[in-house]
Amino acid sequence: MKNNISLIFLLLFVTLLIISCNTSLNKDEKRPNIIIIYTDDLGYGDVSAYKKGTLKTPNIDKLANEGIRFNYGYASSATCSPSRYALLTGNYPWRKDGLRVITGGSLVIDTTEMTIPKLLKTNGYKTGIVGKWHLGLGSGDGVTGSGLINYNSTISPGPNQIGFDYSHIMADTQDRVPTVYIENGDVVNLDINDPIEVNFFHQNKNDDYGLPTGLKNPELTTMKWHHGHNGSIVNGVPRIGYMKGGNDALWSDIDMSDHFLEKAKEYIKRNKKKSFFLFYTLQQPHVPRTPHPRFEGLSGMGPRGDAIVEADWSIGELYKTLESENLLDNTLIIFSSDNGPVLNDGYYDAAVEKLGDHTPSGGLRGGKYSLFEAGTRVPFITYWKGKINPGISNEMISQIDLLNSISRLIGSEYKSKDGLELLNLIINNKGKGREELILEASTRTAYRKGDWVMIPPYKGQSIARNVNIELANSLEFKLYNLKNDPSQKNDLSKKEYNKLEEMITSFIKIRGKDFTNIKDLIIK
């Protein structure tokens, strides 16, 4: 009997040892390279591997079909700046007071906070970001868009102060000024005799602040603005905000994807003999959609579809670089999007008219800016040649779980407050995912637990009219069962009163004392 018990304990020990070896590094193993590919406004149905839309994305599909495709992968927020904050820090964005979409604001990640690049850098990695940033720069007055950033000297703090050795970025988004690239804090190709000035509030009293504007000079535009984008015109595109100076530093919109791709490839080749982390943050398909002419018309869906085709090609080219440099066998690739899709987001570009049968949201309700599912459920794929076996996961996972999972992968003990360690799920498609998750959109929050989603009452318009997306605002609670109703058509808050109360109670435990009175809002 004693021998049998000893044998059982021995087998249990060996099993646990095997699991541990499969989900974290042995001391003698070379640390894997880690690449996070982050698209901008790409919907759940925009990746053809999910079999929800009609657009073709063969290179992203390769990652999905030869890796793990997560059907319930979530961004933390339905807008970009909060999502990027959460991914890098492993913490919910609503914990950062007032964090919304940033326009010309200061750095929102405190330089004392732990981040993925900082964690990896302190563990011997080279760390780089190429592409969109949108987490603020400098130390101005927060996220209000004061325009206090001095672009004519080295900008700090920024990506390099929160863990990145190398950064080659755009400050905010392609539709905002300044329309320049910034490398390691310095504007690329800046002529000091032509300094940059930026203003996000208004033109000066004489109405001659720098470049012509879309509002005053529509005849100078090659892309017409629909709402909000009527400031300075650069390359025929009217932007958000006003800019003057920096003429030698202005980017070329149609060359942007190629530009970022080349910088990403250079970074990989430069650091291939070391363990490296690359945050490759594509600007597509965020507005303005400006695919290179060689991609125009390929999707049949106008500039938005063509921009996605261009992004897919860029990802394929990055893959080829890893392959030619013999890095695929030791590189973990994670692919996702910062939030759900939007069609008309400020310009007339035929995104609505040429959509056809394609469904960017994949049949989910809502989209960017929304607390409904399409706002935060996004493509989520993990790929590692020879390490990850092809598979599909129906477990719930969030981008805030990446920091803790990467921490486990490299043998670190650091854990963020809100993230979970899901490395076994990410690598082996085994184990349980999240049981619960707070979803966020423009500081409003909802709660998912198991198959259920609860959305509290919020005042405000039910549909964002400019973009024609349902926001989920209502004066009453909403309750949905995603297993039976993935499109959230049937509100069960009146029929499933006990479940609603249970969800509210669990929600309050996470959100804290400021939400303890929301039960009083229930209309029985």
Image (cartoon, rainbow, N blue to C red):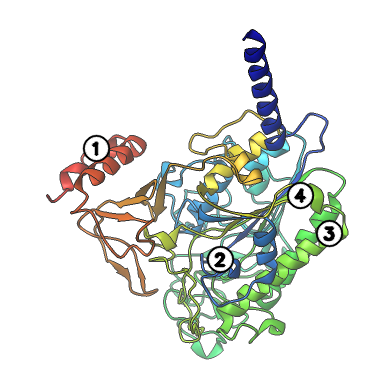
Q: Is residue 193 visible?
A: no
Establish if 80 lies above or below 508: below
Measured from the top left, where is residue 141 in percent x and y? 47, 48
Kindly identify which numbered label has been placed on residue 50: 2
Badge 1 or badge 3: first in the primary sequence: 3
CA gap, disc 1 and disc 3:
53 Å
**In the rendered image, which quarter contains the N terminus?**
top right
CA gap, disc 1 and disc 4:
45 Å
Residue type, label 1:
Thr
Q: Secondary structure at mark 3?
A: helix
Q: Nearer the viewer, mark 1 or mark 4?
A: 4
Q: Which residue is most to the left?
A: 524
CA gap, disc 2 and disc 3:
25 Å
Disc 3 and disc 4 in contact, CB within 8 angstroms: no
Residue type, label 4:
Thr
Q: Is residue 21 visible?
A: yes
- Residue at horizontal 70 percent and vertical 25 percent from the top: 14
Q: Residues within 10 Å of mark 1 (few under 14, many from 20)?
A: some
Disc 2 and disc 3 in contact, CB within 8 angstroms: no
Q: Which residue is mark 4?
A: 331
Q: Which residue is most to the front?
A: 1
Kindly identify which numbered label has been placed on residue 516: 1
Residue type, label 2:
Tyr
CA gap, disc 1 and disc 2:
39 Å
Disc 4 and disc 2 in contact, CB within 8 angstroms: no
Residue type, label 3:
Glu
Residue in front for this viewpoint, 474 or 52: 52
Badge 2 or badge 3: first in the primary sequence: 2
